[in-house]
Amino acid sequence: MIAEEIVKKAMEKANGAQVTMVSAETSAVEFENDRLKSAESSQRTTIELKVIVDGKLGASSTTDPNDVEGVVNRAMEAAEFGIPVHFEIPDAQELDPVKIYDPKLLDLEKPEMIHMGKGMMEMIKAYNPEILGFTEVNRTISQVDYANSKGATYSQEHTSFGIASGGNLIRGTDMLWAWHQVGQKKRELDTEEIAEQAITHFKRAEEIVPIESAAMPVIFTPRGAAALFLSLMFAVDGKNVLLGTSPLKDKLGEKIADERFTVVDDPFVDFGSRTSAVDDEGTIRKVTPLIEKGLLKNFIYDLDTAARVGTQPTGHGSKRTWTNLMVSPGDTAIEDMIAGIELGLMAHSYLGLGQGNPISGDFSVNLFAGYKIENGKLAGRVKDVMLAGNVFEALQGITEISKEREEISGFFEGQVPYIQVKELSVTAK
């Protein structure tokens, strides 16, 4: 195994070493503006090496599996100016079984992927022929190899399958862009359901209605919940806790959200987009409750931040990335949530997510897709509207969580319900 060879070479001069090697073959089909834009295949290998030399960390990377000497030499040179190392290379452990490989995806060729994309686009065009349709279908087969100087060697084969469908509807000066996307590690994706979801977004958005500035209840769609989870992601990041910049740094075990709100990071979801047994640092993954019935349960640590605060790494890799975010469903149907609001807003997507101060939780975002709720019904799409508030106040002010959940792909992956908060500031031009 090349990863073991690199570690062996590095250990001629280093005190410790670890390598992650990812080899991936991808096929992708894309339709744009009603036409086939591309149907391509590609192969790529990335190798990342970290070495410990005299207590300092050096790192390098390459895309050439034959560049063993070069990647080692560059890492050794980087270690001369590297940061101090506080952690130890993980010992070898037995991996828990995970479902991350679907052999059915091996037989999926570009002609069938083109057929899938064309079928979804035709469904959207049948709904409204003025929509300029787009679809994307991609399939990746990859192998991840890990090796370190403690004798740990892991090799796992992954598959992934992603589909997006939607389109662009231009009417005068109004441009409506609506889509739906899903990603997972198995072939069983319902293309008709994905297209139907995109059509649902068009149905909600095609009629434009006015709304006045006011404080009002807001329902976040599963995708729209990104406005809440962005600040939460920063707040539970162990690096921000270590630096003292997380607003939750002293609140472990305390109530930070409504008791109906439970969030678990689960790397073992069958065929989940980010399911895996081990991270890129050789740490065995585990289920990590983040918020349990409103109580803050855990922060997310890599090897370095865990060592520096005196705890254990959580298996989220060197970038402390969430795996599959599982938000517990509630007891209320989304139709009943909407029916209970006299005047409010449904937030689905944004322009410039991250504006404001994500670390503190303060946000102020322009809605890309937002819908007015009036007299218990979705009245139509609002334009030129800004949504503002504080994420941690919003989490405390959750009033309903839907019993329906949706698979979410993109900024974060997982299963998320609709979340209603008591009141946020809505500003209309």
Image: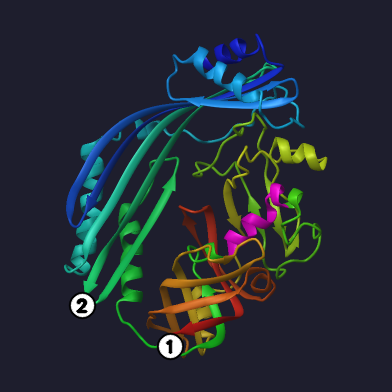
Q: Which residues are magenta?
A: 228-240
Please name whichever residue, 187 or 295, is drawn nearer the observer in this view of the structure: 295
Mark 1 surroundings within 10 Å by alpha-carbon count, few (fewer than 14), some (14 through 19), many (20 or more): many
Q: Quadrant of the C terminus?
A: bottom left
Tell me: residue 149, above or below residue 426.
above
Residue that badge 1 annotates: 211
Residue 47 placement (x, y as % from top left)? 50, 25
Q: Distance from label 2 to label 1 (Cα)?
A: 21 Å
Residue 326 placement (x, y as % from top left)? 59, 54
Tell me: residue 171, above or below residue 275.
below
Q: Which mark is residue 263?
A: none
Could you tell me if residue 298 is visible in this image?
Answer: no
Please name whichever residue, 46 or 262, is drawn nearer the observer in this view of the structure: 46
Identified by mark 2, the residue type is Gly
Q: Residue furthest front?
A: 81
Residue that badge 2 annotates: 172
Residue at 51%, 76% (x, y): give it. 387
Tell me: residue 229, above or below residue 18.
below
Residue 288 placement (x, y as % from top left)? 69, 47
Q: Secondary structure at mark 1?
A: loop
Would residue 336 be found to the left or right of residue 188 on screen? right
Q: Quadrant of residue 250?
A: bottom right
Please name whichever residue, 259 or 102, is drawn nearer the observer in this view of the structure: 259
Q: Secondary structure at mark 2?
A: loop
Tell me: residue 8, above or below residue 76.
above
Residue at 24%, 69% (x, y): give it. 169
Q: Nearer the viewer, mark 2 or mark 1?
A: 2
